[in-house]
Image (tube, rainbow, N blue to C red):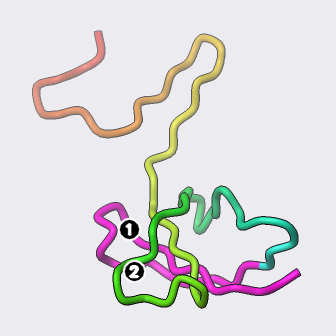
Amino acid sequence: MRVARAILFGFDRRVIVGAVRVVIVDETPKVILYEGDPFLPMPVPPGWDAKAVLAYGQERPYRADEGLLELAGALSKGEGAS
């Protein structure tokens, strides 16, 4: 078991949204939920020490339940569901 710092990047992968401590038992987490938003692993930015920090990028949430499909993204003006 070890502790690591995970840096959370926004949608554009340039703005840091936050940083959290992660306890790793076997392998790094596949997703981090922060304030209800999912963050998935991404490559560590160039020049950063990949052994000292983990990088996670914000993703748009989506679900596919029986009879329901949530859109991952926003509709453009003039577009709409019919």
Between 66 and 32, the one lying in front of the other is: 32
Does residue 56 sit above or below 79 in this rendering? Answer: below
Q: Is residue 58 left or right of residue 11?
A: right
Q: Examine the image and state in which quarter residue 54 appears.
A: bottom right
Most frequent secondary structure within the magenta stretch:
strand
Quadrant for the C terminus in the image: top left
Q: Which residue is mark 1?
A: 10
Q: Examine the image and state in which quarter residue 19 appears.
A: bottom right
> Circles 2 and 1: CB distance less than 8 Å?
yes
The three-letter amino acid code for the residue at tag 2 is Ile
* C-alpha distance separating marks 2 and 1: 6 Å
Does residue 63 sit above or below 58 in this rendering? Answer: above
Residue 16 got which mark? 2
User: Which residue is found at the position 43% from the left and 88% from the top?
Assistant: 48
Does residue 65 sit above or below 76 in this rendering? Answer: above
Does residue 76 sit above or below 2 in this rendering? Answer: above
Q: Earlier in the sequence, mark 2 or mark 1?
A: 1
Residue 20 got which mark? none
Is 30 colored magenta in this rendering?
Answer: no
User: Which residue is found at the position 52% from the left and 80% from the top?
Assistant: 7
Between 79 and 56, the one lying in front of the other is: 56
Between 16 and 56, the one lying in front of the other is: 56
Magenta residues (range): 1-22
In percent of width and height, residue 26 lies at 85, 67
